[in-house]
Amino acid sequence: MSSNVTGKLNQSSSELDLDRPNIEDYLPSGSSIIEPPPGELRLRDLLDISPTLTEAAGAIIDDSFTRCFKSNPPEPWNWNIYLFPLWCFGVVIRYLILFPVRILVLTTGWVIFLSSYIPVHFILKGHEKLRKKLERCLVELICSFFVASWTGVVKYHGPRPSIRPKQVFVANHTSMIDFIILEQMTAFAVIMQKHPGWVGLLQSTILESVGCIWFNRSESKDREIVAKKLRDHVQGADNNPLLIFPEGTCVNNHYTVMFKKGAFELDCTVCPIAIKYNKIFVDAFWNSRKQSFTTHLLQLMTSWAVVCDVWYLEPQHLKPGETAIEFAERVRDIISVRAGLKKVPWDGYLKYSRPSPKHREKKQQGFAESVLRRLEEK
């Protein structure tokens, strides 16, 4: 719950009375409220002593968790006879001219990529070092074609990442295109959720050549396997830089949710990356629960452009006496400040799960006890 709601919950009852509207003001003239007999329990009394109901009302008014995963629609501007023709002209340009050109660009990119990648992957199997270097360059190339297909305008700040042992890069996460935007500059080995369809096919074939690691949220055993793979990867001097999105889910680029501590327990240097999208042309947030990644790509390819800034920030190290959770929060602070994002104290995985029965029973028991206490007082 947000800080405003928590502050309201801590107010005294006298302070709450000052904010409570006078019901008599809303009654017709001559009407009055019938006062209950002395000692009779009123609904108003129950509301006064029920933190649960106050908490629920606050959640409806200011739900900081749901806001993290909402895509804010753009303000309509084609609202009069003068602007509507301009909007129609823009639709014609975007869908009938830019979109076909972008499809052609992306198709050309795939033809060049596949005609080069397949021979390199199979013919150079005995020359691992050369093969990995060429595959790395080809993955960067196809990612550049993807960015070009959105007319991507990306400004990179700071030194470009280099291949070094015992370092991991962490970034805030808005969409799967975060990976593409970062990958076109440096061939990262990313840790990512396993996806179905054509994205899953690319994950299990092409992206595995750069050392990417996949997991499934529903498989508890995957966590131990992934943790071991991460530790092994960061120790390799020739491995591609490891990229992790510690939020574990896509957030709408207004907020940052809690960072998972796994990336901060590897006993290595953590290099923060801040990504901020400009929503003037399109909202880059991918709501995976409402649209497929293919639909998301089509939305980007029919927009005017994708504009964003990427900051490679100063590497961070675990301080003496600092826990992994504290380290994660410190890095989250750095990324949030640089990208202008608001921090919220939520676990992003709650997006995929419901509250446990124990949590519900605890809330129900607290509510019942508060009502019983008030009944006993009456």
Image (tube, rainbow, N blue to C red):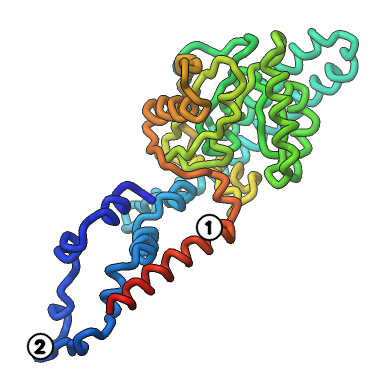
Which residue is denoted by mark 1 in the rendering?
359
Q: Residues within 10 Å of mark 2 (few under 14, many from 20)?
A: few
Which residue is denoted by mark 2 in the rendering?
29
Q: Position of residue 257 (x, y in %)?
A: 47, 40
Disc 2 versus disc 1: nearer the observer? 1
- From the viewer's perspective, tell me whether residue 46 is left or right of residue 335: left
**2 and 1 marks in contact (CB < 8 Å):** no
Query: In this orientation, does residue 88 appear?
Result: no
Query: In this orientation, does residue 293 appear?
Result: yes
In terms of depth relative to the viewer, which is nearer, 210 or 277? 210
Q: Quadrant of the C terminus?
A: bottom left
Q: Position of residue 27 (x, y in %)?
A: 16, 84
Mark nearer the N terminus (2 vs 1): 2
Q: Position of residue 275 (x, y in %)?
A: 47, 29
Q: Is residue 198 above or below residue 350?
A: above
Q: Position of residue 102 (x, y in %)?
A: 61, 35
Q: Residue at x 15, y 74 (%)?
A: 22
Q: Residue at x 43, y 71 (%)?
A: 368
- In three-dimensional space, the C-alpha distance between marks 2 and 1, rounded to whole angstroms, equals 47 Å
Q: Residues within 10 Å of mark 1 (few under 14, many from 20)?
A: few
In terms of depth relative to the viewer, which is nearer, 212 or 111? 212
Q: SS at mark 1?
A: helix
- From the viewer's perspective, tell me whether residue 128 is left or right of residue 47: right
Dot 2 amino acid type: Ser
Q: Is residue 137 above or below residue 282?
A: above
Residue 245: which quarter of the image?
Answer: top right
Dot 1 amino acid type: His
Q: Residue at x 56, y 13 (%)?
A: 161
